[in-house]
Image (cartoon, grey):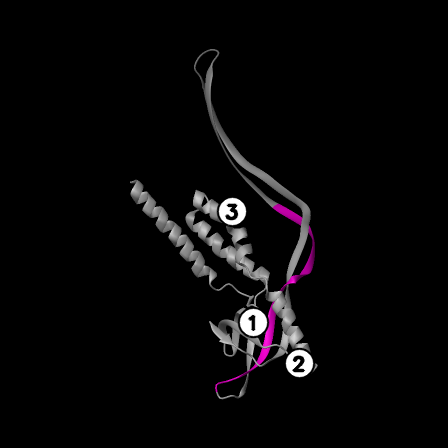
Amino acid sequence: MIQLDPQRVLEVERHFDEKTAGEARGALMHQFSMFGQSFGIGYAVGERTSVGASVHSGAIRGMSDVHLALASTTRHDLMGDALFALFETRDGDGSADTLRVTALSNGAVLEWIHGLVEQTAQQFGLDTHSGATIQAYSQRLAAHFAPADVSYLSDRLHLALAQDKRGEQAPVIGVSGVPSGRGAIVATSARIGTADDLRIFPTAFPAMWGHTVGGALAAASASAQIAS
């Protein structure tokens, strides 16, 4: 984690999530033929009774033909934008430099947290009480820990860019994040002026989740040892 105080905003771009919904309708046609052979034998055991045996073997061969019509609509999620911003900074020698800041959309972070919880449930086994319980709470956990300030940060950066173009004094902007390349970070939190920090990406969640699950397993193991 690094904390930076950029000088001013140079560029801001939004990248909205897309959602596609639709339906597929059609028909399935299957043509098949059956090929086989049989062999039977019988013999009389009395005037009115007989015993017989037969063997039949066969195979079915065919082909299927599917005709489908797909109708779908793709819409932008106007409240689910990811962020790209370019800042002017100063290096250690005081020379002008740049900082590229990216932020995942709220929907992408939700899926990331949901995936971590689902993996834990699968490790326990979805046919166990623990695994089924964790899976049932996965969506609620994702919604609770996912940040919700990415879109607001994008709005404030656009405002700061407009203020700078008008010659007005923009608020001081601070950014914290994880390095993702030379002069680039993935934002985890941001601060605009003296307001509270904006939550962008919950990098501490995996460690918190692992500690919680590990503590629960340790407590369950201790209880089992006491009971035995």
Amino acid type at mark 3: Ala
Disc marking residue 24: none
Q: CA distance from mark 3 to mark 2?
A: 48 Å
Residue 145 vertical position relative to residue 87 in the rendered view, above or below? above
Could you say where residue 71 lies in the image, as x and y percent from the top left? 70, 53
Residue nearest the observer in this picture, 138 or 208 = 208
Q: Is residue 212 left or right of residue 22?
A: left
Answer whether labels 2 and 1 touch (C-beta < 8 Å): no
Answer whether labels 3 and 2 touch (C-beta < 8 Å): no
Residue nearest the observer in this picture, 4 or 52 = 4
Q: Is residue 166 magenta?
A: no
Q: Which residue is mark 2?
A: 164
Q: Residues within 10 Å of mark 1 (few under 14, many from 20)?
A: some
In this view, which residue lies farthest toward the front? 194
Could you say where residue 24 lies in the image, as x and y percent from the top left? 67, 50
Circle 2 SS class: helix
Q: Which residue sits at x=65%, y=69%?
A: 155
Disc marking residue 136: 3
Q: Which residue is mark 1?
A: 191
Q: Is residue 91 magenta?
A: yes
Circle 1 SS class: strand
**Among numbered discs 3 and 2, the one appearing first in the sequence:** 3
Amino acid type at mark 2: Asp
Residue 87 vertical position relative to residue 188 in the rendered view, above or below? below
Q: Residues within 10 Å of mark 3 (few under 14, many from 20)?
A: some
**Among numbered discs 2 and 1, the one appearing first in the sequence:** 2
The answer to whether residue 128 is visible is no
Q: CA distance from mark 3 to mark 1?
A: 35 Å
Q: Which residue sits at x=32%, y=47%?
A: 222
Amino acid type at mark 1: Arg
Could you say where residue 188 lies in the image, as x and y percent from the top left? 52, 68
The magenta region covers: 64-92
